[in-house]
Structure formats: C-alpha cells, structure tokens
Amino acid sequence: MPRNLSGRSFLKLLDFSTEEIQYLLDLSKQFKNLKLSGTPHRYLEGKNIVLLFEKTSTRTRCSFEVAGHDLGMGVTYLDPGSSQMGHKESIADTARVLGRMYDGIEYRGFDQKIVEELAAYAGVPVWNGLTTEFHPTQMLADVLTAYEYFGYYKGLKWVFMGDARNNVANSLMVVCAKLGINFVACGPKDRMPDDELVKTCRKLAEENHCTITLTDDVKKGTKDANVIYTDIWVSMGEPKELWAERIQLLSPYQVNKDVMANADKDAIFLHCLPSFHDLKTTVGKQIYDEFGLPEMEVTDEVFESRQSKVFDEAENRMHTIKAVMYATLK
Ligand code: CP
Ligand code: NVA
C-alpha cells in the first residue's frame, strides 16, 4: 500500500515503521525495473539536491548523483573540506542556508547528532549517507539484494561477522528487527552493539517475531545462516593505530570457506564494500607489510565465489537511494 513519506528526512531506520521500510523496498524494485527497461523517470525535474561529504565515498556518492540525474534533478557535490560547515559555519547555519537553495540534502560524516541537527534546521528532507553510528541507505540495498536472491526476507538468519559495534552492524540489527529477520552479531564481546540499541531492537524483534542474538562463537553463530555479512575492521574516522588491536581481536571472525561451509548450503555472502580481500589496495598492502595479512575481513576466495552477491548489492545502492529521494521529495 502506498505510504506518504513526502517531506520526511531519512536519518535512521528506527524512525520508520516496518510498513514504511517495506514501501521503500517496493519502490526500489519499481525504480530498478524502470532503469533496466530504459524507461525515463525524470519525476523530480526542476528540483536540486546537495551532497555534503565529510568522509570519502564511491558507492554512496555515485548512487546519489546518478539517482538524482535519473530523476531529473540538479546535483551539487561538496567534498570533505570544500564547504564552510564546521570550520567557519555552524551546522544550524549551514542547514538554514542550504535549505533555502536545495530541495534535499545528503550528509555523510561523523556523529549522528550532526545529521539530526541538519534535519532539524534545514526545512527540507535530509538523508543520512553514513554517520559513525548508522548507515541506513545501505540497509535497503542489502535487504533488496537478499530478497532478489531468496524471494523473501522474513525469517532469514542473517549474520554480521566481525566489528559488530560499527555503523553497518548497528543499522543491520535495526533493519532485521523491523523486518522480521533473525539477526546474529558474531564477534568479540567488546565489539558488540551498544546495550541500549540491543534492548530497543530486541523489543522490536519480539513485535516482528524474530530474534537478536549476540555471540562470540563462530560455529554456533553462523550455523545454517542464510546471509553472511561483514565489513572492514577499522571504519572511516577511526585512528589507524587501531589496526593492530582490531586484527588481533577480529581475525577469528574472518569470513572464509569454513564459515560459508557451516552456513546453509544456499547461503549468500554480502559486504557493504569497500573490502580488504586482496593486496590490490594501498591500505591492504600496508597491512600486509606490517602484519603479514594478505586478506582481512573476508578471504578473496569467498569474495570472488558464486555465493558472493556484493556487486548486485552495490548496484542496488542506486535503486534504493533513488526510492528514498523520490518518496521524500515527491
Ligand atoms: N558502502 C558504501 O557506503 O560505500 P562508499 O563508502 O563507497 O560510499
Ligand atoms: N563501517 C564502514 C562502512 C563503509 C561503507 C565505515 O564507516 O568506514
């Protein structure tokens, strides 16, 4: 059933009902069909959006740009360092200025409270393109990818391996609790999601007939899983000095062929990307030189396997971000 999200910001999934998230997923499928059939959909012609990035990006930036252009909008990109925000102008003032010029604002950066403050002052929809705490647009792409593969998502067992305290793990736990997906955080005890968030998600999970499990046991955690998911071990904004500690702490939670063999035989592997699965990146090489690790959160074997759907997932970022912009700006 169509939902009216017009004028709303998209800051975190906790702000959206199960039905509203389902609506955004349905809309994403429709936009994907339009794109793949070559049907023009310039439904937001004449509108303009601005993309504020305080951290780097490939997928999120390109998704907002292409989706914006496909919808007929003008798009301005402000890279980390090329706006006055934070250095010379407060968040509230920036929001009020941009809100006078643009119909929507995307923000990628640091604390969740920054994106919340932007939204409080902008007077136009603000979309969270990743903060330290959450990465909500990523989740729509992840669930859409699983849905395309399995034909359903409710009741799946979805395991996040590794740094279960980061933005992607937090958001994954929320989306699973909202959509009736059984979520497992599989990692060391001191990299588990925040207690308050776990409590909130467990309550949601009860309402939606699914479970939230936290475990440091890889065998039990990944047994018969339908989706195995991971992310990098040190996130953007964290100091590089953390690598040594994280490698030691998270190496037992690497996604490798044993993990995939312990999961359901039809399990898929997902990763928000970028990923350190080989030595073809500068950081990957530095880690190898310093710690002797040729691959990190996922082995190259799993990343390149038939079970890996990471590039379908990356493509789906664009279709889902388009749905979010359309739903909130139409
Ligand atoms: N997954 C994701 O957000 O990728 P980027 O950092 O490239 O935007
Ligand atoms: N946890 C990662 C996600 C990147 C898309 C980070 O914040 O760097």
Image (cartoon, helix red, strand yellow):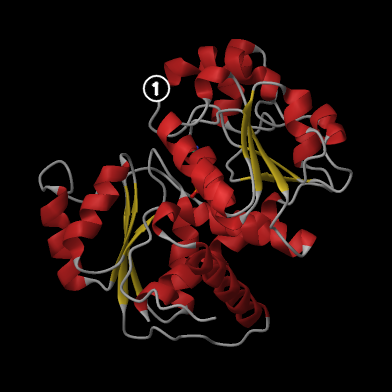
Q: Please tell me whether residue 88 is drawn above or below residue 220 in the rendered image.
A: below
Nearest to the observer: residue 322 or residue 204: 204
Q: Which residue is mark 1?
A: 239
- State the image coordinates of residue 289 (x, y, percent, origin top left): 61, 14
For residue 299, say whether it is visible.
no
Nearest to the observer: residue 153 or residue 112: 153
- State the image coordinates of residue 141 (x, y, percent, origin top left): 59, 58
Asked where in the image residue 71 lies, by quadrant, the reply is bottom left
- State the image coordinates of residue 24 (x, y, percent, origin top left): 52, 69
Label 1: how many residues lie within 10 Å, few (<14), some (14-19) or many (20+)?
few
- State the image coordinates of residue 56 (x, y, percent, origin top left): 41, 44
Asked where in the image residue 54 lies, by quadrant, the reply is top left
The structure residue drawn at horizontal position 75% and vertical position 40%, both measured from the top left corner, is 303
The structure residue drawn at horizontal position 44% and vertical position 30%, both measured from the top left corner, is 195
Q: Say which element carries label 1.
A: loop
Does residue 254 appear left or right of residue 141 in this picture? Answer: right
